[in-house]
Image (cartoon, rainbow, N blue to C red):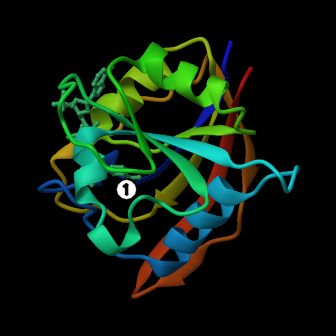
Amino acid sequence: MTKFYLIVAMDENRGIGKDGDLAWHLSEDLKYFARVTKKTKDPNKQNAVIMGRKTWESIPDKYRPLKDRLNIVLSRNADYMVVPDIKLARTFEDALEVAEENKVETVFVIGGAYVFEQALNRPECQGVYLTEILKGFDCDAHLAPIDKKSFERVEESEIHEEKGIKFRFVVYRTK
Ligand SMILES: NC(=O)c1ccc[n+]([C@@H]2O[C@H](COP(=O)([O-])OP(=O)(O)OC[C@H]3O[C@@H](n4cnc5c(N)ncnc54)[C@H](OP(=O)(O)O)[C@@H]3O)[C@@H](O)[C@H]2O)c1
């Protein structure tokens, strides 16, 4: 069983994005995302990031594929694109298999809403790295509820602030 974690930033109304993009720009959160998803215990290994096709398209060209991580993009369209250095997966199971075959250390599911919803309901899900943004934004993509019966909150950072927006980094693990 290939285990994975979610990593997601969410506002106080569960909003995670708007018009195919994020609804905020918090450089400290982007740095946290990079740090968590790149970090490995074994210096010879890398981690994998699994994302939906729409999230892939939302990443500016100059930042994709996300470097130092195996990028796995989910699309039902087998001809979607041929980009060297990324892996295309046609089902969630495929995506996990690709991660397994490539012997990555940790697998992170990085969005978007549709992919998070599937991920939260899978037995391989080990936890959620959640950036709680303590403000409401106009969003059209939302995170499915994190079931309090299945997850416990195990870490919570102090409150950070950038551009007048307060936020904190929390970690949920499956019970
Ligand atoms: N705040 C955050 O942390 C965060 C993180 C990531 C994204 N976002 C935001 O989330 C929004 C995008 O979310 P979204 O729900 O619209 O799109 P998405 O989840 O990024 O992508 C959905 C697409 O992924 C493919 N897909 C998903 N599950 C699949 C499966 N099981 N098998 C095969 N293909 C699968 C399909 O592509 P095809 O249509 O090609 O088949 C589907 O249309 C954006 O606003 C983005 O900025 C926020």
Q: Is residue 108 above or below residue 68?
A: above
What residue appears at the point 66 percent right and 20 percent down from the top-left corner?
A: 2
**Does residue 117 appear left or right of residue 128 in this picture?**
left
The picture places residue 171, in percent across and down from the top left corner, at 67, 45
Report the front residue among 121 and 53: 53
136 is higher (above) or lower (below) than 53: below
Residue 126 seen from this side? no
| Count of all numbered marks drawn on residues in the image | 1
Instruction: Tell me the residue at 61%/60% (across/down).
Output: 68
Q: Secondary structure at mark 1?
A: loop
**Residue with the most extreme left position:** 19
Where does label 1 land, which residue?
11
Amino acid tagged 1? Asp
- Residue 38 appears in view: yes
Q: Where 105 sits versus 38, above or below? A: above
x then y, percent, for residue 20:
17, 54
Position of residue 25 relative to residue 124, above or below, is: below
**Identity of the residue drawn at 75% across and 39% down:** 105
| Image quadrant in which the C terminus is located | top right
User: Which quadrant of the figure contains the N terminus?
Assistant: top right
